[in-house]
Image (cartoon, rainbow, N blue to C red):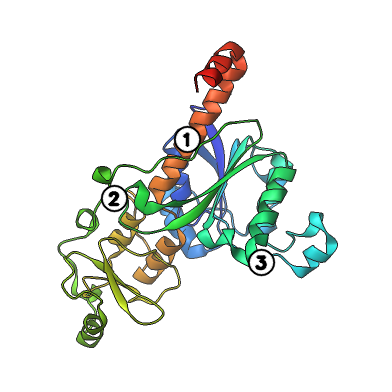
Amino acid sequence: MDWNTFKFIDLFAGIGGIRLGFESVGGKCVFSSEFDEDACKTYETNFGEHPSGDITQIEAKDIPDFDILLGGFPCQAFSIIGKMEGFDNETCGTLFFEIERILREKQPKAFMLENVRNLVSHDNGNTFRIIRSHLEALGYIVYAKVLNALDFGLPQKRERIIIVGFKDNILFTFPESIPPSKRLSLSDILESDVDDKYYVNKRIRESRLMRLKDPNYPRPYISHENKAGSITPHPYSSCLRAGASANYILVNDERRPTEREMLRLQGFPESFKIVVPYSHIKHQTGNSVAVPVIKAVARQMIRALKEYELNKHNPAKGLFLHIAS
């Protein structure tokens, strides 16, 4: 197979961050699915297609053939019913089950799944153990690692687990972080002329500054209010969150980040169109992915797949590469 062009599907697509990553290495999306209608509006404006709706209502056989399955699925606890009924049923009723049934029916060459860091420790590690064992039971070699957006050039601390799987016996290594000199700073992504509507009122501002851990912290900074109420400034943003309060993170304790700044914090291109209100973009960026992380993983996946194909057709070269490494 020629991995310079390949087909993928985009499940739990959100606003298309994972899609952007895999399009950047030659992929063509042949099917997308997203439940949230506001996210679909943003997706359609930027990619020219309206994602199919609820994946639980879509038959796997009705999905076009593809080479790689992609999905940033929500983390859910696995049911007590499943545990009682044994291995085959232990993912029933979860959205991971939808990925599992599509992989079983379509048998793609590879997949990449993205989830919150806490998936690893969720339910004392049981959730991740079940996910991994079910993917391996489908015949995939599975790799997993927590990657941080800060290490891939974005001024946002965002740690996510990336799970990669291959049908063939493919050697895969996760991408290395990029040098600090090539990473974007807050100054690179913050706008200089910002509308008054983004600025918080005087009471909120004074309250934040009173609780600021380091009042002399150099600007620009983004501060984060934790559950205890203390305000910590950083030269990067804390993790964008879909459900957090409007003032969860503030630029210089003065204003909320703009729509474009939130998209930049996730690595979306300047050409990405905004067609929904602020609250929706905040929710959508909080639910999305750090695009440079996905791009880096996509490059590594395609490199590994190409090398496997090359070695398969030229065993002597594969032996030489193995000995040399």
Q: Is residue 2 visible?
A: no
Q: Position of residue 16 (x, y in %)?
A: 46, 51
Compared across the picture, whether 112 is left or right of 19 comes to: right
**Residue located beneath label 2 in the image:** 270
The secondary structure type at the circle numbered 1 is helix
Compared across the picture, whether 155 is left or right of 294 comes to: left
Q: Is residue 109 visible?
A: yes
Tell me the CA gap for discs 3 and 2. Answer: 37 Å
**Residue located beneath label 1 in the image:** 300
The secondary structure type at the circle numbered 3 is loop
Q: Residue furthest right?
A: 85
Tell me the CA gap for discs 3 and 1. Answer: 31 Å
Q: Position of residue 119 (x, y in %)?
A: 57, 60
Q: Position of residue 149 (x, y in %)?
A: 38, 52
Residue at x-position 66% and y-position 51%: 99
The mark nearer the N terminus, 3 or 2, is 3
Q: Nearer the viewer, residue 72 or 301?
A: 301
What's under tag 3, amino acid-wise? Answer: Ala
* Numbered badge on residue 77: 3
Compared across the picture, whether 42 is left or right of 317 comes to: left
